[in-house]
Amino acid sequence: MAEKQTFDQLKETLYQEKLDNGLSVYVLPKKGFNKTYATFTTNYGAVDNHFVPLGENEKVKVPDGIAHFLEHKMFEDEKGDVFQVFGEQGASANAFTSFTRTAYLFSSTQEVKKNLTTLLNFVQHPYFTEQSVEKEKGIIGQEIKMYEDNSDWRVFFNLLDNMYHNHPVKIDIAGTIDSIDKITKDDLYTCYNTFYHPSNMALFIVGPVEPEEILQLVRDNQGEKEFKEPEEIERFLAEEPENVRREKEVLPMSVNTPKCLVGYKEPDPKKQGKELLRYELSLQIILELMFGQGSETYQQLYKEGLIDDSFSFDYTGEKTFAFSVIGGDTKDPDALAQKIQEAVRSMKQEGINEEEVERIRKKKIGSFLKQLNSPEFIANQFTRYLFNEMHLYDVIPVLEELTSKDLEAALTEHFGEDQCTISQVVGKKAEESA
């Protein structure tokens, strides 16, 4: 029986149910919307490469890039390509693999029940052959080569490689040409059977739907299928030191404008639930205080021509890793890195301006409310929060109750000197003449 949760402040009602097979189902009815958006997500991503397979006792290490490879292969079955089926049913389908999760999704204005059934059935029907696995290696190999030539991608993954000694977050989500070459059909089934169990997954549907109708469809669909008993998945990670692996990396590439990213590695990323939410929102406010368009640093950098519209900042917090990234395209990568580090040091010395915090708090609440008009945002963010034991609809109450003490603590904890690293991409000529 579905549980009903009402969020008065946001005028939202969420229906949720945990099925007998362990699947968590969430339905968010949105009366005024014309589009329905659904995501079927597994708590499994690129970093989960070392684990005990379901029903076994020995741990295995699978090739890097396998979660992404598996996502690609799921769209193919005996009958052909599932994308075509969605297209014929008037839906747009897609999927993505991140460091920590793999999501399959569709959006449509018609045939919602039919499309939802298709989504459930194809994700729960793996079909891999040796031949199709070999063919896929060529396709993903091309994708990897394409990303190797992408300077934005390279500057970001070099930053992670600078940060992490052992954690698999430093490895490209797609893996390497060598690692994907080692993937076998059996490896794919091992990962699928372990991580695609309904108890490790969540289904989220948002749109102009009748919750009980949708929940009944999902109950009936899941009731017709057989699954093994759910088990707690054992995942393993190598020990990771608190400090960064290296302080700086410069990569010469064929680029017109150099790129510079400054990153701060979370020293002890073990927070979950409300604690992580408070910390994450605190750091987002701090980054906005230091580098948002209303900040002195931003204005100065822009005036000096050190940044353009590509400049951005972000904090990523997950169960086993977390980091912030600041930077973009710049004519002088060293000057930009220096100014970013100076801005951080300066805020740590001078402390936090209460008036500015209030301005940014209001701005963040406003932009979050605006994002809640997007079914894509709701579905994707809800699941990310869920897998970290947080709740999307706690964001505004937590933002409202954050204190300067929370912010000061996050500032001190996250922006340590030993946690800082720089990644730059420069033009080949500049590097050769240096």
Image (cartoon, rainbow, N blue to C red):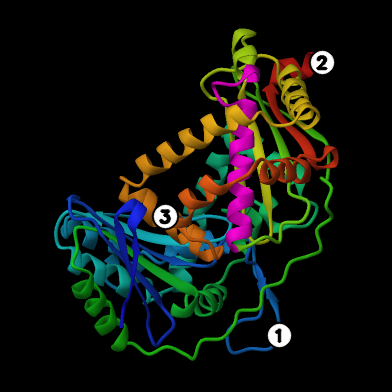
Q: Quarter of the image holding residue 57?
A: bottom right
The residue wearing badge 3 is: 380
Name the image quarter holding the N terminus.
bottom left
Point 41% across, 86% down: residue: 21
Q: Which stretch did the figure color magenta?
A: 273-297
Label 3 crowd (10 A; few <14 / some 14-19 / many >=20): some
Residue occupying the point 45% across, 72% down:
201
Q: Label 3 is placed on what type of residue?
A: Asn
Q: Is residue 292 above or below residue 107?
A: above
Residue 382 horizontal side relative to residue 114, left or right = right
In which quarter of the view is residue 324 placed?
Answer: top right
Residue 109 magenta-highlighted? no
Q: Residue at x 45, y 61 (%)?
A: 383
Q: Say what amino acid the circle numbered 2 marks.
A: Ala
Residue type, mark 1 in image: Glu
Residue at image mark 1? 58
What percent of the width, then of the height, locates residue 403?
63, 44
Give the Cα distance between marks 1 and 3: 33 Å
* Along the viewing direction, whichever of 309 and 298 lies nearer the viewer: 298
Task: Examine the rendering and report whether any part of residue 391 can be seen.
Answer: yes
Dominant secondary structure (helix, strand or loop) of the stretch shown in magenta:
helix
- Secondary structure of the residue carrying numbered label 2: loop
Task: Identify the mark nearer the N-term, 2 or 3.
Answer: 3
Distance between the alpha carbons at the discs numbered 2 and 3: 45 Å
